[in-house]
Amino acid sequence: MRTLGLGTVVLAAALALAGCGGPGGREDAAAAVAVRLLDAVDQGDGDAACATLAPETLADLEQSADQPCAEAILGEDLPGPGQVTTTNVYGQWAQVRLDTDTVFLAVFRGGWRVVAAGCEPRGDRPYDCTLQGG
């Protein structure tokens, strides 16, 4: 597992304090992308899973696995899809908590993209994430 950097920890803390943070449409859109990622991985559809990733996350995955994203992502130990329990949006960032995972997202030109997934909280310490950009 990889540990999220200080910036992401600050983001996570801000999201936790912010509550919902914005209109329901933004939360729903972010949650849909998080669910789409986990569903695609669960169904073995690497191309669909990779389409949800932020550019830096995709590049980091390909580099660390030394194979194309569509193959590499299926080898990651991501949890299965689950029910969304909370979605917090703060500006251009979102945190989607499912009963199986915590997923961090950011807004890009094409909409929400996954920055980190397979994340588990560790109290006051940074999240441990299976998948994240450098």
Image: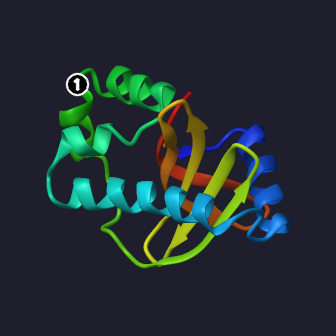
Observer-nearest of 31 and 123: 31
The picture quadrant where one finds residue 43 is bottom left
User: In percent of the image, x 43 and y 73: which residue is there?
Assistant: 100
Q: Is residue 108 above or below residue 52?
A: above
Label total for image: 1
User: In percent of the image, x 21 and y 34: which residue is there?
Assistant: 70
Picture coordinates of residue 28, whole percent (x, y): 53, 65
The amino acid on which the numbered mark 1 sits, given as a three-letter code, is Pro
Picture coordinates of residue 73, whole percent (x, y): 28, 41
Can you say which quadrant of the picture contains the C terminus? top right
In the rendered structure, the answer to whether residue 43 lies left or right of residue 62 reads: left
User: In percent of the image, x 44 and y 25: which residue is there?
Assistant: 60
In the rendered structure, the answer to whether residue 62 lies left or right of residue 71 reads: right
Q: Secondary structure at mark 1?
A: loop
Neighbor class of circle 1 (other Cα within 10 Å; few <14, some 14-19, many 20+) is: some
Whether residue 78 is visible to the viewer of this picture, yes or no, is no
Observer-nearest of 35 and 24: 24
Q: Is residue 27 above or below residue 127?
A: below
Whether residue 12 is visible to the viewer of this picture, yes or no, is yes
Snapshot colouring: rainbow
Picture coordinates of residue 51, whole percent (x, y): 32, 38
State the residue position of label 1: 68
User: In percent of the image, x 74 and y 62: which residue is there?
Assistant: 22
The picture quadrant where one finds residue 6 is top right
Observer-nearest of 42 and 88: 88
Picture coordinates of residue 10, whole percent (x, y): 81, 48
